[in-house]
Image: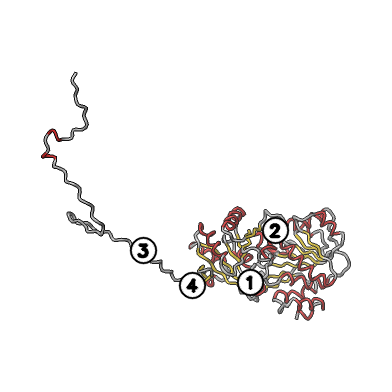
Amino acid sequence: MMIEKMNPSFQRHWRSMRFQLPTPIQERSFEPLLAGEDIVGLSPTGTGKTLAYALPLLEKIKTSSELQLVVLTPSQELGVQVGRVLEEWASLRDVKVQTLIGGASVKRQIENLKLKPEVVVGTPGRMLELANQRKLKLHTVKTVVLDEADYLLQPEHMDNLREFIKKMPGQRQMAFYSATDSENLREVSRWFNTQPAIIDTADASTDQTEHGYVLADNRKRAEVLRRLGNVKGMQALVFVNSVQELDYLAEKMQFENVKVRMLHSDYGTSQRKDALEAFKKGEAVFLLTTDVSTRGIDIPDLPYVINYDLPLSQEVYQHRSGRTGRMGKEGRVLSLVNERGIRDLRKLGPRPSETTEWFIFKGQLVDERPETVPDAPQPKMKEKVKKEKGVRQETNRTPLPEAPKKAKKKNRTRSQKNKGARRPKTEE
């Protein structure tokens, strides 16, 4: 078993973290990576892929003050997160780890490289920049890992990636990890000198995530999201497709006194970090974000993911969903859709027949349509009494005294008729 084969310091730390048994991808990756084999590791999000490659590869590191392991990530957030995990375990063996990501100070990174770390983690763009400046020396690298490899192997990233890897020795170990399969992953031998074994544990994982929806017209989604913000125990990563819509939604929620934070590509590294940390501390109900957060963001025990906008592909839906229900824990994914959107949602979800409709009722989410609350009794209107022609209606009011009758006009003499106030004629 994997735990029994780990370094004793790793075993002690594993038990102190109260981890249970290793996940399938962790168990099946350990020996091949320890033996120096090239692999493609496929496993759903939230199954511990970082430790799956980190533990066996850190076992092999020699504290010789030369770079031996490079881990590439597609985003700054994932680079920081992976760097923290590697630092935590590497410190048990006095191995130095440095994170190199875009958006951070280049001068500070160059200074830290003078400490000669054995492991570097970060984004390909910043690493290639430092390698071209000869500040990051790659001639001693033994292993390179591509985390979220399906993304890194896309055509728009391939040129920079190949240029960077060519700076390493030709005989190096390669590992490719991803939550989703792709043609590029199956054909990595076309671009790199490697014939990796494929370890696919998708069927072996235990997914506890529920998938459902709340009906909402497009113009009413913000109001439905506000109501969700008042549901007991609500804390959610809310995905929006555009930055403009995200800014509008944040302003709307703040106006409605719903505590939110934002995380998108226009933010700098420090802004993203502050927003993420505030959300993890429970200082916000919603973390509004674009798909910049679909890969690698780890928020422990996150109960909900909300799709304010449906994603454009099944792959993106899978990565969004992977932010909740991690490591076998329970989670729930809710999508705000109209009647037409239900059909699109069922094409994206992993189990279309198990997509549940949810209702917001008295501050709770229920999966049965609440009974209609009877309307409050309306005050009775006074009935209008139809007057019969020629019949005087009796009332309780005191009758007014009758006015004196006027003489009929036809009985008046000519001199009594009112011809208007006329000035009498005067004699000249």
Q: Label 1 crowding class (10 Å Cα cut-off): few <14, some 14-19, many 20+? A: many
Decide if residue 254 is on the left or right side of residue 276.
left
Comparing labels 1 and 3, the label whose residue is closer to the camera: 3
Q: Which mark is residue 325?
A: 1
- The answer to whether the residue labelled 3 contacts the one labelled 4, judged by CB atoms less than 8 Å apart, is no
> What whole-number distance in Å separates the C-alpha atoms at marks 2 and 3?
56 Å
SS of the residue under disc 2:
helix
SS of the residue under disc 1:
loop
Residue at image mark 2: 272
Residue at image mark 4: 368
Comparing labels 3 and 4, the label whose residue is closer to the camera: 3
Image quadrant of residue 80?
Answer: bottom right
> What whole-number distance in Å separates the C-alpha atoms at marks 4 and 1?
23 Å
Decide if residue 374 is on the left or right side of residue 187.
left
Say whether disc 2 or disc 3 marks the residue closer to the N-terminus: 2
Which amino acid lies under the numbered mark 3 shown in the image of this protein? Pro
Q: Position of residue 97 (x, y in %)?
A: 81, 65
